[in-house]
Image (cartoon, helix red, strand yellow):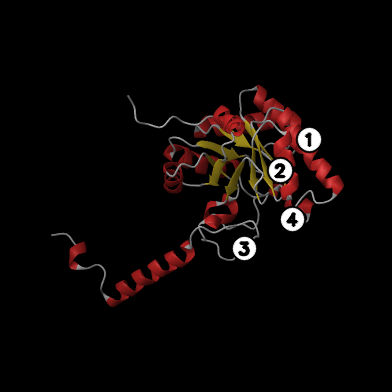
Amino acid sequence: MSDQPKPLTTLDVVAMKRAGKKIVSLTAYDALMARMLDASGVDLILVGDSVNQVVAGRPTTLSATLDQMIYHARAVQGAVRRALVVVDLPFLSYQVTPEEAIRNAGRVLQETDAAAVKLEGGVTMGPTIRALVDRGIPVMGHVGLTPQSVHALGGYRVQGREEGAAARLLADAHAVEEAGAFSVVLELVPSALAARVTKELAIPTVGIGAGAGCDGQVLVLPDMLGMNPAFTPKFLKRYADLDGTIRAAVSAYAEDVRAGRYPGAEHGFE
């Protein structure tokens, strides 16, 4: 009998909500980190278009490309044995027409072996989500602060604080569910509103900056590991200080090389 863990499916994630089990999610962009997350029991790994910022150094997610997302998703999926891998569809890969969304999302699944795609938007994206789901492509939705619309939203700001905005966000979340998505990310949403959405939906909610009432939580891995000390949003909890650890290690290495201490005799070959 194989000792390999059984891979999680979208149905397993939906069942976690019904069972009252919190969903643990983090981003990953490479095999090394994905392997560690998977071995640590993370349920859902998101290959986010945030890679365009945290790895490629761009100011927003908007210039991420489909080829870029496929490259990173293939690396992540190849290292994962249990976690469900979801891949962000980048800007303009799904908004133009449902037909183009089907083609691009299908290419993601075909070339990466990932389990699902994620796209941003609510009511307006309902027909596209339905078109994907009807063709066997699982979809995770994303409402609230939608980073691909950052310029239209006036920056990275909490969404749904005013009564009208809250009503629109609720409508967006319900539209995502009704279109067939298996889950939805709630980003930068007031805690009480996110808890209401979570209670009203049958599909799981995964929050980032949306309070403790969501069915699960997701963070960008380098932010959670303290690799980006300049990024200090209220919702972020750092679980390590890898920026300090890495800087100290590199400085020690540089000092040893310059002083002739590395490599030592024990690091050479006869």
6 vs 27, nearest the viewer: 6
On residue 123, the disc is 1
At horizontal 80% and vertical 51% (from top left) the residue drawn is 161
Residue 98 in view here: no
Q: CA distance from mark 1 to mark 4?
A: 20 Å
**Residue mark closest to the camera, 3 vs 2:** 2
Q: CA distance from mark 2 to mark 1?
A: 20 Å
Vertical position of residue 7 compared to residue 210: above or below: above
* N-term mark: 1 or 4: 1
Describe residue 174's horizontal placement relative to residue 78 as left or right: right
- Is 25 in front, or is 127? 25
Mark 2 or 4, closer to the camera: 2
Near mark 1 (Cα within 10 A), the count class, few <14, some 14-19 or many ≥20, is many
Q: Amino acid at mark 3?
A: Thr
Residue 241 in view of the camera: yes
The residue shown at (71%, 49%) is 191
Quadrant of image for the N terminus: top left
The location of residue 207, given as percent across then percent down, is 64, 45
| Residue 198 position within the rendered picture, expressed as x and y whole percent measured from the top left | 70, 38
